[in-house]
């Protein structure tokens, strides 16, 4: 940024966005606006298109119509979006430490050190265990720790509570809360409640 140049505040916006698979439109006319420090819950029945919308926001699927704009993001900072899918994207023969080192290598922008991220999600004692031997909830925690080791301002979380016990759900709420408090944005597709105040809700209506 040059002296005197002012960046607009971070804000994720969609304009008349249509999302779908192939040529099949699942939802259209989506107008979202989520600013720094705010979270949005995506609700809707199975098959309504919540995952499809998250993948489209992440740039992994193309919009069928309309557009997505992330205002106020400095491209020099690197990619803006963390997409955490409902599958954990964990390689079974990498240890928990190696998994996070791998993802940090891929995603760049180092944030929390790997050991601290594992501590934060309650996996410190299991750091040297192959990911294949982690329980389902522990694998989920490891997938969430990926968000902590590389800094990206927008978190797109697909069913993040999946397999988490009550303590894990509290932990997840805390991670999101801290991310929002640091000026981040979160868009979360979930059928579960997440214990966070002031989450806006956007509902996709039509299910499969
Ligand atoms: N690769 C694909 N090819 C074709 N159709 C797909 C593909 N992936 C998903 N779909 C279809 O897109 C529709 C929306 O799926 P999506 O996963 O976005 O829904 P969702 O709202 O996230 O559902 P859930 O609550 O069950 O997770 C579904 O009917 C699904 O079958």
Image: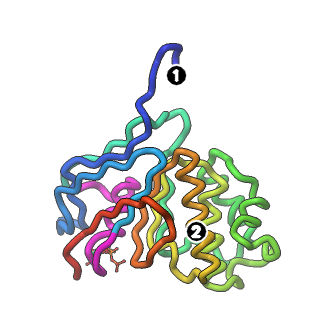
Write down the region rendered in magenta: 43-63
Element type at marker 1? loop
Would residue 117 appear left or right of 106 to someone viewing this image?
right
Quadrant containing ligand 1 reads: bottom left
Residue at mark 2: C-beta within 8 A of ligand 1: no
Residue 124, percent from left and from top: 79, 70
Q: Judge by depth and name the residue closer to the eye, 72 or 61.
A: 72
Instruction: Give the mark nearest the N terminus, 1 or 2.
Output: 1
Residue 52 colored magenta?
yes
Would residue 74 appear left or right of 17 to someone viewing this image?
right
Q: What's the CA distance linking mark 1 and mark 2? A: 34 Å
Find disc 2 in the rendering and name its residue. 172
Residue 119, percent from left and from top: 76, 66
Given the current orientation, which residue lies at the most extreme top position? 3
Looking at the image, which residue is at 38% across and 53% down? 59
Q: Judge by depth and name the residue closer to the eye, 140 or 122.
A: 122
Q: Judge by depth and name the residue closer to the eye, 162 or 106.
A: 162
Q: Quadrant of the C terminus?
A: bottom left
Looking at the image, which residue is at 56% across and 58% down? 177
Task: Name above or below for residue 120 compared with residue 91.
Answer: above
Q: Judge by depth and name the residue closer to the eye, 135 or 196.
A: 196
Instruction: Tell me where residue 163 sits by quadrant.
Output: bottom right
Looking at the image, which residue is at 53% across and 45% down? 183
Task: Name above or below for residue 33 compared with residue 24.
Answer: above
Residue 54, percent from left and from top: 37, 62
Task: Name above or below for residue 126 compared with residue 56.
Answer: below
Element type at marker 2? helix
Find disc 1 in the rendering and name its residue. 1
Label 2: few (<14), some (14–19) or many (≥20) C-alpha neighbours in 10 Å: many
Residue 42 colored magenta?
no
Residue 165 disc label: none
In this rendering, the label closer to the viewer, 1 or 2: 2
């Amino acid at each position: 940024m040059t002296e005197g140049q002012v960046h607009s505040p971070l804000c994720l916006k969609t304009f008349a966005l249509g999302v779908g698979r192939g040529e099949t439109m699942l939802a259209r006319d989506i107008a979202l606006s989520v600013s720094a420090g705010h979270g949005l819950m995506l609700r809707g029945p199975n098959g309504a298109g919540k995952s499809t919308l998250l993948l489209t926001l992440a740039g992994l699927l193309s919009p069928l119509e309309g557009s997505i704009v992330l205002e106020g993001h400095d491209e020099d900072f690197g990619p803006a979006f963390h997409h955490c899918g409902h599958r954990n994207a964990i390689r079974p023969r990498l240890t928990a430490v190696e998994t996070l080192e791998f993802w940090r290598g891929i995603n760049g922008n180092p944030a929390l050190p790997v050991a601290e991220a594992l501590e934060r999600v309650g996996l410190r004692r299991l750091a040297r265990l192959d990911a294949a031997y982690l329980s389902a909830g522990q694998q989920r925690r490891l997938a969430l720790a990926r968000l902590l080791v590389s800094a990206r301002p927008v978190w797109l979380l697909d069913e993040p509570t999946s397999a988490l016990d009550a303590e894990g759900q509290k932990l997840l709420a805390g991670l999101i809360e801290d991310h929002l408090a640091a000026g981040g944005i979160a868009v979360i597709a979930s059928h579960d409640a997440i214990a966070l105040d002031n989450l806006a809700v956007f509902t996709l209506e039509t299910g499969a």
